[in-house]
Image (cartoon, helix red, strand yellow):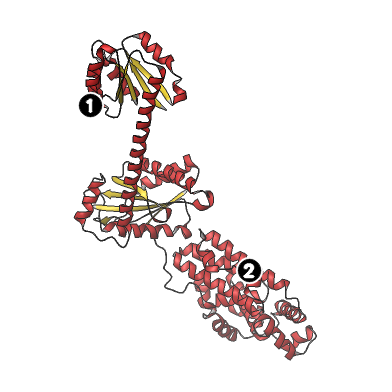
Amino acid sequence: MQKIMIVDDESIFREYLHSALDWEAYGFEICGEAKNGVEALELMEQTLPHIALVDITMPFMDGIELTERLKERYPAVSVVLITGHNEFDYARKAVKLGVDDYILKPFSKDELTLTLIKLQKEHQKAQEQESTLKVNQQLIKESFLNHLLSAEYNPSEVNTAERFKQFGIQTTHNCFIVACIEIDNMDRKWNEVSERLLWKYAVTNILNEAMDESGNHLIFNGPEGRIICLVEHQSVHPYETPPLEGYEKLIFLIKKYLKFSITVGVGRSQLGFIGIRSSYLEALEALQHKFVLGNDRVIAYSAQSLETGTMAFFPIEMNENLLAQLRMHNGERAEAILEEVFQSIRERKLSLDYVYVICMGLVSVCLSYVAETGHPIEACFGDDFFPYSEITNLESIEATYDWIQALFRTAVRYTSKYKQTRSSKIAITAKAYIEQNYADPDLQLEQIAQHVFINASYLRAVFKKELGMTVTDYVTHYRMHKAKELMGRGNNKHSDVAEQIGYNDPSYFSKSFKKFFGYSPSEYEITKK
């Protein structure tokens, strides 16, 4: 809707113009009227019309003088002079002063309509051109700023400063800090690109408000759909962590007004334009850690104490134990081991890359178990099973734990469903007998074979085939884990523990324990304390 101001000293003529056209039907509205040029200038500041219909002859300030004043102060306003025949030459000369058109009294409604529609189209065209110019300038500006973040950026500080000036960015290029902002779970919240752009625009507006006191700053759309905030700080020294209050305020405001959460990764202060990329890479690294630390928070690079995984995360026997539990169809114990692994990841705040290594190790154990039972991997998990791709698309450690847990449950469920053979029943019965009688120091292969009514040689072969270990190895395996469980309760002498799990000689028990776990019972108790 385009706004029109009427300026004429005759009230009758002003009333006539009000009723002359169905203004709204043509896309116009009368935003004000004035009796002379002085009133028109005062009203102009309040209404800012697109078109002014101005009479030439008026007291205090006539139409010609008003036109000059309007063109000086408001060059975008179109002026249409309304004049009589005796003022025609006068009006024609006024065109040189910037009058856009003139209408001779008396005029028809069609003549007035055509004049206004012509100006309306000119305004629309000018607005479109201005809008296109702004969009293009913004795109060029964002392209330049994204280039600053890239590895390809290499121009001199002088050239970069010149480009900043071209975009109207005032900077003394002292210390720069980059923050990367991600809307949590954005792809799952909104399917349409237009929706995502709308919410990113809303976040950007609130970010501008939150960062008002944080120095000279620029906010723009960065790589991979993130919002980038580039702040120039004169009060923060190089390699320092910047103040985080503005980002914490942003998180609070987003949650309060937009009802969703964001995560902010913040790099350290870096010197000069060349340091912008360094701070950006630090912000990205900090942001990655939301996978382990969780989202809806500010994560500063210098605050990280995440382990990189150069040391072994857990003993090799943990994977072996996990595989053993799967072979024995002990799903509950397998899930307990998985919970231990992920709890340790959370407590030690391991880096994202190392978490992926651990997860692929767990996947490997699961796939090995399915494969050794004689079942094709695709039969259990489907043809479109690409574990690494699926894991790296997950957004949190909790989601990854759920995914791994579901993977193991699927494997146990599938192999149990399709493996009800006579040999598996024999092995499971023998396994249950061992677990009930492990405290018997005389427990031997022959005794177990008698219980399941087969000869010892056949049991040895069946047990190894079905559970992946010998009968003797399983007896030792079960006894050692029971010993660990008893010692974990505290106040148990080693001799008592040895007796309770079927060892008459405490010294032999200690040697067996160390051989199995890699550390003695005494060393284990020290670590528990």
Percent position of residue 296, x then y: 46, 50
In the picture of the structure, the residue carrying the numbered disc 1 is 72
Q: Is mark 2 on a helix, strand or loop?
A: loop
Q: State the residue lying farthest toward the bottom.
A: 457
Across the whole image, how many numbered discs are drawn on residues?
A: 2
88 left or right, relative to 324? left
Asked if 214 appears above or below 83 in the picture, the reply is below
**Amino acid type indicated by mark 1:** Glu
**Amino acid type indicated by mark 2:** Gly
* Among the two numbered marks 1 and 2 on one chain, the one whose residue lies closer to the N terminus: 1
Dots 1, 2 in contact, CB < 8 A: no
Percent position of residue 344, x then y: 51, 66
377 left or right, relative to 192? right
Nearer-the-camera pick, 338 or 103: 103
Nearer-the-camera pick, 19 or 225: 19
| Residue 382 numbered mark, or none | 2
Asked if 164 appears above or below 408 in the picture, the reply is above
Label 2, residues with CA under 10 Å away: few <14, some 14-19, many ≥20: few
Q: Is mark 1 on a helix, strand or loop?
A: helix
- Of the two numbered discs 1 and 2 in the rendering, the one whose residue sits closer to the viewer: 1
Q: State the residue lying farthest toward the right.
A: 453
Asked if 404 appears above or below 102 in the picture, the reply is below
Percent position of residue 95, x then y: 24, 23
Nearer-the-camera pick, 350 or 523: 350
Q: State the residue lying farthest toward the left.
A: 158
Give how far apart the Cα atoms at labels 1 and 2 are.
Answer: 74 Å
297 left or right, relative to 273? right
